Amino acid sequence: MAAPSESVCELTARLNELIRSSQKDDLMLVAMAPIQILTIAFRDQQNRAEATQSVFESLLHILTRQLAAIEVFTENPDSNRNGQLEACLQLTAECFRCLRNACIQCGKNQSLERNAGLIDPTIQILQFLHRLRGFQSDILSAAFQCGLQFLGNLVAGNEESKHIVWKNAFPDLFLNYLNHSDRKAVTYCCMVLFTCLSAERTADLLSHKKGVELAESVIKIWRKEPELDWAFLIVTEQFLKCPDLVAAMYTNLNNQERITVLDLISAQLRETRLGSPAGGDELTVPVRMMQFLAGCFQEKCMAVLKFTSATDAEDEEALIVIRLLDILCETTSNLEEFSYLQNSPGLVETVVELLYETHLAGKQSRNIFSVSQSLSSISHISHPAVGFKAHLIHLIGNLCCNNKVNQDKVRELGGIPLILDNCSIDENNPFVSQWAVVTIRILTERNMQNQEEISQMARQGVADSAMLNSMGLQVEERDGKLYLKSQEKSS
């Protein structure tokens, strides 16, 4: 359609006159053309600037009449004779297109549309459209897609509009269209939801019985369509910053969806470490959320032993343990921010026990936890548990860094000989010997009891001198006592 020759003011006056003179049944015939012309006109910023309250009041009048008609069709599908519903939906869709275009980057028109009272009937129409049964057409899809786009443009950068849309659309409208079969409707709904959300409104999800269900729906969407940016942004920029919501969601999700959440957290942590967080804002993981995840690891960690069976190589509970361990290693590597995890009750004990169980399992039968020094194990390289024992030792080192209480716990639990027993090359655990060296040095730093234990092991032949030398350590005997010292300091 060509660019309009009439001004916005002239088009508005003509539309108002047509509405006043039209009968109920011919509104579609007389109003469609001028609305279509206005839709095109509002693509231009100057034309948007010329819009007045009058045009939005006219569109409100039309939508109100369409709302009444759609309600009748919803309650009585047999009332759709002679294509009346199709005509009603076409006019509704065109009104939404016009309103959508009018408020593109235009705060003035956003306010005029809101003040005209257009939000409430729009949401009511969208709810009725969702309930239409036995009517599937491109016309229906266009109506609810354009309605959602209108709401998205209306709330962009406009806090007052966000407040009203959230008050009227949460939770039912969001739930209905997040779970809609129409992919574009899901996308546009995610756009509206993301634009409306704030820290306070995200917290609202916990106070409403359907709020957590809404959050879970977004997770399911992102898992099925990871390319959908709006769902990704909702989760990373809102949900993951609310630890209580994460805990509530995580409890209800299935294992595959839990893996999705953990993968998002891992990605967020990597972006923080690399100093290039998405969106330019610093990404952080809340304290309570990490404490929750540490608790999940402690509760379910023994599920990883399912990997001793080749038939369980894709066990989802075991995969969750892998993800949780990776997150704990990443977070505890940043002691300035996550030192509180060193004081998590029972975490050190759990990690040492799990290292013992996996190490024992590897000795009892041939499996992914067995030490392998042969390249024939290259087929294991894609196994999810490759490096698991190395990560456990890494985590022990992180938890014991500058923390004598945890250093002593590891000794008391028999963790030192266990770590020393993992100092050899292991194809199933790349870099395990390096992490063992680092962790032993951490365990012996300013800890005479741990140094003495390793010295006694050397005397008894449990720890040989070559292995200790490879760690940069050596045993010296003075006055009948053995002392463990750093080679650099004794040279």
Image: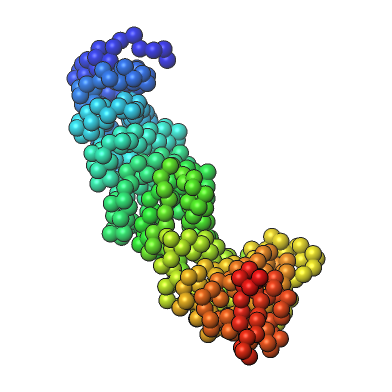
Q: Residue 120: horizontal and vertical position, in percent?
A: 24, 39
Q: Residue at x 59, y 84 (%)?
A: 453
Image quadrant assignment for residue 244: bottom left
Task: Look at the image and tell me whether residue 350 can be seen.
Answer: no
Q: How many marks?
A: 0
Q: How is the image coloured?
A: rainbow
Question: Relative to residue 389, is residue 182 depicted above or below?
Answer: above
Find residue 126 and report its image quarter.
Answer: top left
Residue farthest to the bottom? Answer: 480
Which one is nearer the viewer's eye here, 402 or 364?
402
Q: Is 223 left or right of 387, judged from the image as shown? A: left
Which quadrant of the figure contains the C terminus?
bottom right
Q: Position of residue 490 (x, y in %)?
A: 63, 73
Tell me where residue 303 appears, x and y as whole percent: 56, 73
Relative to 98, residue 187 above or below: below
Q: Is residue 145 visible?
A: yes
Q: Residue, x 68% and y 87% (percent of image)?
A: 459
Name which residue lies at 42% across and 73% down. 343
Q: Is residue 118 left or right of residue 233?
A: left
Left or right, residue 489 beside residue 188: right
Q: Residue at x 25, y 12 (%)?
A: 10
Q: Is residue 111 above or below residue 367?
A: above
